[in-house]
Amino acid sequence: MSGVPTEVLSTQSKAEFDRAVRRAAEVLQRDEVVAVPTETVYGLAANALSSVAVKKIFQIKGRPSTNPLIVHVASWSMVEQCCLHWDGAAEQLARTFWPGPLTIVVKKSNLIPDEVTAGGETVALRWPSHPIMQALIQTAGFPLAAPSANRSNALSPTQAAHVLSQLDGRIPLIIDGGHSAVGIESTVVDLVRRPARILRPGMIHLGDLERACETLSWADSDSPQDTDEEGLQRSPGQLKLHYSPRARLKILTWSDASDLEHQLRRLDLPMDSSSVLSYQNIPNGDRFLRVAVIPDDAEAYARALFSELHVCDEMGSEYILVEAPPEGPEWNGVWDRLRRAEAD
Ligand code: TXA
Ligand code: MG
């Protein structure tokens, strides 16, 4: 596929929106892949009911075939089509959070090819809220398998330009739907095993889930670990190094600029080739490659995070020094992504 020019279609006007959706649906109907905006991050989409199409996603991303994909739906009849069991708890969570950044793992139907689920009996379903994604699923007429539209283990894209920089020449089409509003990937919950469990924390946190379905009990908190207290694997995709910028990332706490400088000297970390992501104690920009300020609010922070990391990489930062954000349930998704980016 390398060398094929990648077309980027904008969706600013109603006419452009309709044209982009029509073009993308045609490409998908030919079993090709398209990069599409969603409210969480951009996705690399293909017909979830076609193993030929789905295999191309793995190939383009360089993703191991053992890591299953999320299937995106846009109607209740598609939900029914994709799964074997849909119980009261699934219904309750879906009615509360869909369309939106929640992915629900249930038993799969025979229509879902093995490639999508990595040979497993379960399927991860999400009904996204982004209008382009909804229009595209409806126009194409089938559910869309879509991982984040980055090369395996690289940073997830929250803008069309991020997708282009990683996949230019590898895919025929990117739809530009602006900046992703949520900014980090969906919360993934497993309802196959009971008690239910959070496989990947996101902006919908355990408290939100508990409030939405009071009869459902949960295995553990959505603490950002790969295994729960019994050592069970949480999610196939969560064990690998993920969400990594090219630069080395370090999470630090500092009281003021001189404290930060002191710590960096002690850790033998450079200043002039490091970028800083701060939200509270903002050091003077002169000594660093870049100093960015992220808002002190979990939703705004998540929305900005990957974009800021992308800029740090583009500027050639050797290190990204992240001021440790606040703790609390609404910060779990952010902490999970930062810890994964720090792991090396
Ligand atoms: O927000 C999102 O979820 C984005 C947008 C594009 O929808 N998608 C996304 O996909 O983040 P991906 O492939 O990058 O991450 C999907 C996660 C992986 O950790 C994968 O292992 C897990 O969901 N997953 C998928 N199917 C699963 C299944 N049947 N059982 C358990 N985990 C599953
Ligand atoms: Mg991903």
Image (cartoon, rainbow, N blue to C red):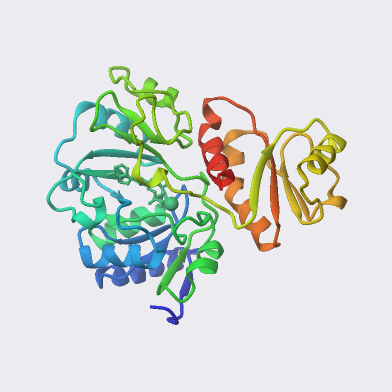
Snapshot quadrant of residue 201: top left
Q: Which of 105 and 21 is in front in this view?
A: 105
Q: Which of 295 and 178 is in front in this view?
A: 295
Q: Which of 134 and 270 is in front in this view?
A: 270
Picture quarter with the N terminus:
bottom left
Residue 38 pos. (x, y %)? 43, 52
Answer with left or right where residue 263 lies relative to residue 297.
right
Identified at 28% across, 61% down, the residue is: 139
Identified at 48% across, 49% down, the residue is: 241
Residue 9 pos. (x, y %)? 47, 70
Answer with left or right where residue 24 lies relative to residue 10.
left
Residue that extends furthest to the top in the rendered view of this protein = 215
Q: How many labels does the image show?
A: 0
Identified at 56% across, 48% down, the residue is: 344
Snapshot quadrant of residue 22: bottom left
Residue 190 pos. (x, y %)? 30, 34
For residue 74, above or below residue 152: above
For residue 246, above or below residue 91: below
Answer with left or right where residue 261 lies relative to residue 183.
right
Q: Which of 309 and 211 is in front in this view?
A: 309
Residue that extends furthest to the left in the rendered view of this protein = 110
Identified at 79% across, 38% down, the residue is: 263
Residue 245 pos. (x, y %)? 59, 54
